[in-house]
Image (cartoon, rainbow, N blue to C red):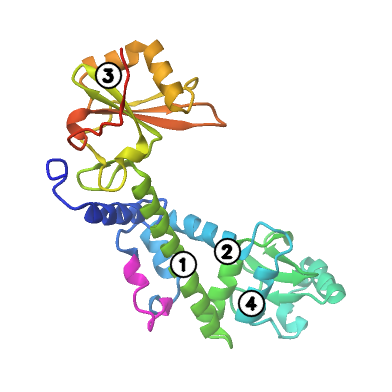
Amino acid sequence: MAELFDRPMSELREAFVRARFAEPAMFGTHNIERYTKDSKEPLAKFSSPRYFLDSAAPAMDYYYMNHLAATWGIKHERSEVKIGILAENASEVETPLTTFLGDNPDVRAGLNGLLEMMRRGGAKLYDPQSHDLSDFGHGCRNLVVVNNNNVYSVRYEYSGHSIDLRQASAYDIHEVLEGEFTQHRARAQQAIQLLDREFVHAVQLAREAAERDFDEACAVSADGTKIVKAEWVVVVDGMKTFLYSAAAFRDDCKATLRNEPGGRLSLPTMENSEAGVRAYLTRNRNIVAEFRTRLMDYLVFDCGGSDNSFKVLFIRDVFCPRPLREDGIEIRI
């Protein structure tokens, strides 16, 4: 291993996890876990959980909200989970409806449908912002309504006096909980502690997924930030070619990735089995010949169809642990 990597595999694994955290589509920062370490000081220290969600990476909201949607059962129209979240961690709007609707006659007319629904169904109303809604009349307003065990988001456009009623999203419910905290309502501590736990959970799941991907990889870059996961590994050793199951290159026996790959090619008709890969490469000898003559360090093939996709890594023997394992199947080209 010393000839392939200057750092132990455990350090490379941690480097990969932190690189995954830093991806724009994840958390946008490699040290996101510093926000989760001090259990005595929850995310309230940022004034609200969205303080760093919005500032760290534009896509973080998307990743985090997907986590909340999965955790809270948002995709299901009737979700006892999300109804319970609101009932236990947020305060209902208890002001009289006349106060809630304000004195603006246009606002009264525009929200008449919502008012009737609330009266007939005994709906519960939650507001992400201030409970004093007498300042209606500017821009738009989002409300969350629980009615007949369904959770809706109601968006009211002041300019056109129109109402958009749809199933509530994770973002809508998150906004209610954040509003509970920022508006210092009765359940502010429950709300912020719930969001704190959910964020810690999201980071934990991201770490576990990254560690699993690294463990399943058959090759890793010298700095640990890049990996290749494949089902099969083809090692070109001088004029010989050997086929291995990717399991032979896991744990501390990973190959090393140097430079950039020679590219990604598609082989849709290859069968995902030792016999299938061997037969395909035997019939198509030009694939191995071209890899050898072009002096590429490694190459990844996307194989199989849409229902059975898998990857095959071609790599030179000098980038593999030495000596090569004896259980490789020689492919005679």
Contact check, label 2 and label 3, Cβ < 8 Å: no
Marks 2/3: CA distance? 46 Å
Dot 3 crowding, Cα within 10 Å, few <14, some 14–19, many 20+: some
Q: Earlier in the sequence, mark 4 or mark 1?
A: 4
Find residue 71 and name its label: 2
Mark 3 secondary-structure assignment: helix
Q: Is residue 303 visible?
A: yes
Residue farthest along the front direction in this orientation: 326
**Mark 1 Cα-neighbour bin, 10 Å: few <14, some 14–19, many ≥20:** some
Q: CA distance from mark 4 to mark 2?
A: 35 Å
What amino acid is at disc 2? Thr
Query: Residue 135 got which mark?
Result: 4
* Quarter holding residue 32: bottom left
Q: Nearer the viewer, mark 4 or mark 2?
A: 2
Q: Amino acid at mark 1?
A: His
- Residue 224 place in picture, x, y as percent: 25, 48
Q: Earlier in the sequence, mark 2 or mark 3?
A: 2
Task: Determine which residue is flagged by label 1.
Answer: 201
Please state the total of marks drawn on the protein image.
4
